Image (spheres, coloured by chain):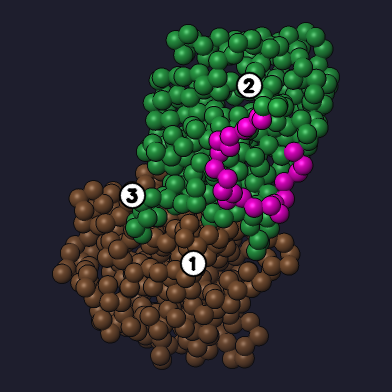
Amino acid sequence: MKKEKKMTLTLPADELMACGHLACQGCGATLAMRYMLKALGQKTVLCIPACCWAVIDGPYPYSSMDVPIYHCAFETAASTATGVKAGLEMTGDTETTVVAWAGDGGTFDIGLQALSGAAERNEDIIYVCYDNEAYMNTGIQRSSATPYGAWTTTTPVKHFKTRPKKDIVAILAAHRIPYIATASISHPEDFFKKMTKAKGIKGTRFFHVYAPCPTGWKSRPDDTVKLARMAVQNAYFPLFEIEDGLRTTLNLKLKEKKPINDYLRLQGRFRHLNEAQIAELQAEVDARWERLLKGCGA
Amino acid sequence: MKKVMMGNHALSYGAMLSRSQVIAAYPITPQTQVVELLSEMCADGTLAAQFIKVESEHSAMASCIGASVAGARTFTATSSQGLALMHEMLHWASGGRHPIVMGNVNRSMAPGWSIWTDQNDSLSQRDTGWMQYYCSSNQEVLDTVIQAFKVSEKLMIPAMVVLDAFALSHTYEVVEIPEQEKVDKYLPPFKPAIRLTPSDPHAFGGLTGSEHYFELRYKLQKDMEKAPALIEETGREYEKLFGRYLGLVDPYRCDDAEFVFVTSGTAGFTARVAVDDLRMSGVKAGNLRIKVFRPFPFAKVREVLQKVRKAAVVDRNCSYGAHGIFYQEVKSALYGEAGMPPLFGYITGLGGRDITVDTFKEVAAHALSKDKADEEIVWIGVKK
């Protein structure tokens, strides 16, 4: 008789995000929210600035979430969350986890000042940046999270982005906050584990979550998880954590670091790149990876 | 208990007696003493509040909004450039119906850099949906903060308590500090009907289509229209407990007046001295000090001015391309009403130039020499 294969469900079955949301097909940011809430549970409050998720949740008077949300101004995810935490504590609720949940534009660009302020004060919040590498909600404009070479509506192929992606994790590490982690929707167990760990830490915790966007990347909706996994495996988006801004731990060691070509080929936003340009992006990924390994003491 | 204190500290004491629970603030001259004293009060336990030392005024208001929606009584203070930086969040606070109370020290807008007083900073925020109270004494500053919380929390509309830079913010006056027990009786703890809590999850301020948005703003205006009566009612209640009435306007010798100044801020008290002097020289003068600018006390203004022969609005501000801002408001209050007096508009004291008794005498001499105004702005004390 054939041996029966068993898969163990490693994540809680409870869902705090219901169906009926307004995300595009294959939206990575939606999976990111779902996995985060599985780790944080119902005693969670979300502060969401202008970003895709300001829409995904559903229009007034509807919400697809079983946790409360405050929709805040674009640059105020961190400062609003700071106030919410203080307000909850002053009214007797010291348990609820307060999350600032923002896109890359709201984090790398317009919200950076408020985030830096909150991090420097070590406010007791979890800040999650779901990164789809451009202003997707407004129609795919470049942000400082957009990588070298990518097409966006404000970086047309004849004038694509020639500067590298901003190293947001290094900026946060420089604030010496207690916990920073990268996470990917392709690795939910790793994401869940680190989010659960973060929940138990006091102070500012920062998550940089990779969230592919088929609409903006010109990729197939059914390739979202695959792309996210490829980005981890080719070290474009490695999984690691940093404690107190000092101790870096690689969460997923790569047996074989794959080249980025296959990853790029699945996305229309990189289609115009020639070999030399791809090599330039590859060199940047390699250099970043080397720096990370060095940081881990490897 | 009586205490000699500066106007800025009157704001701090008002916030303390109101038992503010969260304060988020950023320093700016000439507001700094407000938050310095509050941070001391929080540090030594005089006030059981969290003080968030944010990195900008924009974040100050964002944090206040977060704290307010979580159900805490929330206070901040700013001035001028800081208030302007908050502009986006001022709309957010009123649109989200968060009853935050904020002190604003009137300081001129740069450039050129000025730390001295005029009203263009707060009046630029006229249409943000905040209530605005203009104060003329330190006592009034302290009392108004307490009243502002009461009115704001009833209507779920934020309020600004405004005082002149230096002329009030740094001027020391004797202030009666109300007993905490009586303040607690007047102002019970903040208990909003709904708040941001996992025990009753809601989404606040999500995407709102044209099917709903209009009604939300209609309700804001309708509630703002309830404010004048509520300010008078809570003002009388305050008077019963503390002996000082806090109303919409403050008429001085207006009952039999033929000529009335319309004023606000500290100039409103200077005008009283000019009124007394003018009366000694035979002019039946009066002064109508406007205490509440938003909601604008249209009925009260008409009630006082319909009995006089001439009125002169003295503005420490300018709506460039139009006129003095209080002048415009008073004019709109009188328009279309029978028996209203001719109105004269004066602009003076921008950038902290002194407004003295002589300034008002110059205004009076000009207005009394003419049957009606032949220009919309008469500039007093400007080097042309």
User: Residue placed at 65% from the left, 29% from the top?
Assistant: A5
- Looking at numbered disc 3 in the image, what kind of residue is underneath it? Phe
Give the residue number, with chain letter if any, for mark 2. A232
What's drawn in magenta, residue-wise?
A4-26
- Looking at numbered disc 2 in the image, what kind of residue is underneath it? Val
Q: Give the label on residue A142, or none.
A: none
Graded by Cα atoms within 10 Å as few (under 14), some (14 to 19) or many (20 or more), the crowding at tag 3 reads many
User: Residue placed at 66% from the left, 71% from the top?
Assistant: B215
> In the displayed structure, would residue B162 be above or below residue A67?
below
- Looking at numbered disc 1 in the image, what kind of residue is underneath it? Ile
Residues under labels 2 and 3: Cα distance?
41 Å
Residue A185's spot in the image, x, y percent? Answer: 63, 33
Chain of the residue that carries numbered disc 2 in the rendered image: A
| Chain ID for green | A
Residues under labels 1 and 2: Cα distance?
43 Å
Q: Give the label on residue B51, or none.
A: 3
Residues under labels 1 and 3: Cα distance?
24 Å
User: Residue placed at 55% from the left, 65% from the top?
Assistant: B129
| Chain ID for brown | B
Chain of the residue that carries numbered disc 1 in the rendered image: B
Residue B183's spot in the image, x, y percent? Answer: 27, 73
Give the residue number, with chain letter if any, for mark 1. B194
